[in-house]
């Protein structure tokens, strides 16, 4: 019985890694204004970008609205979803490309509540949309 695992998404962006990272490290509160599938961001504890802060989000995937809470532990984000998963950890790595732009590597580590729950592949569309829309937003700025 495998209850934990990880899924990875790797995408190329045209904006510099430092600007893209800044959105998630210093402008997270603006994410709902940048990405269509992300909405209802609320801060519950701490500051938007401090370790230990707690926030909740609403997001749309596969035509359904999901809500989750997250807390920031260092650079990793931990998301707890009680219906199917005990834990999520989102990791973002950025690698500058020599010819400009960067490669984003998103990793989702997860623990399922039971073996009948599928891996969280459906969240890869959120990651893809978030990456593409954030990149487009940064290139307009």
Image (cartoon, rainbow, N blue to C red):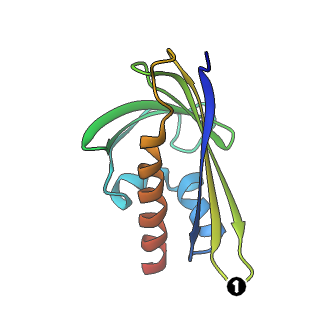
Q: Position of residue 118 (x, y in %)?
A: 46, 29
x then y, percent, for residue 139? 48, 78
Question: In the shown orientation, is residue 71 left or right of residue 44?
Answer: right
Look at the numbered disc 1 and give the secondary structure of its residue: loop
Residue 59 appearing in the image: yes
> Residue lying furthest bottom in this view?
99
Vertical placement of 95 versus 50: above or below?
Answer: below
**Quarter of the figure that contains the C terminus:** bottom left
Q: Position of residue 5 (x, y in %)?
A: 63, 31
Q: Name the residue at 75% across, 81% down.
A: 98
Image height check: is 141 above or below 78? below
Image location (x, y in percent) of residue 22: 59, 61
The residue depicted at 30 percent of the width and 44 percent of the height is 62
Q: Nearer the viewer, residue 5 or 66?
A: 5
Callout count? 1
Horizontal side of 41 relative to 52 (left or right) equals left
Q: Residue at x 71, y 71 (%)?
A: 96
Q: Residue furthest left?
A: 63
Q: Nearer the viewer, residue 1 or 111?
A: 1
Q: Is residue 117 above or below residue 131?
A: above
Which of the 4 quarters of the picture holds residue 57? Answer: top left
Q: Counting other residues with Cα less than 10 Å from the Cα at mark 1, is it few (<14), some (14-19), or many (20 or more)?
A: few
Q: Is residue 109 left or right of residue 140?
A: right
The quarter of the picture where the N terminus appears is top right
Residue bearing mark 1: 99
Q: Is residue 45 visible?
A: no
């Amino acid at each position: 019985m495998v209850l934990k695992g990880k899924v990875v998404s790797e995408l190329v962006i045209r904006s510099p890694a430092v600007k893209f990272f800044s959105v998630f490290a210093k402008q997270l509160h603006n994410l709902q204004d940048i990405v269509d599938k992300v909405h209802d961001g609320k801060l519950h504890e701490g500051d938007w970008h401090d370790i230990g802060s707690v926030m909740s989000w609403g997001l749309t995937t596969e035509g359904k609205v999901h809500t989750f809470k997250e807390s920031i532990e260092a650079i990793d984000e931990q998301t707890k979803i009680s219906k199917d998963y005990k834990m999520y950890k989102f990791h973002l790595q950025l690698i500058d490309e020599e010819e400009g732009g960067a490669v984003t590597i998103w990793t989702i580590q997860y623990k399922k509540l039971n073996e009948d729950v599928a891996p969280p592949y459906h969240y890869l569309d959120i990651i893809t949309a978030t990456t593409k829309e954030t990149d487009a937003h940064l290139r307009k700025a």
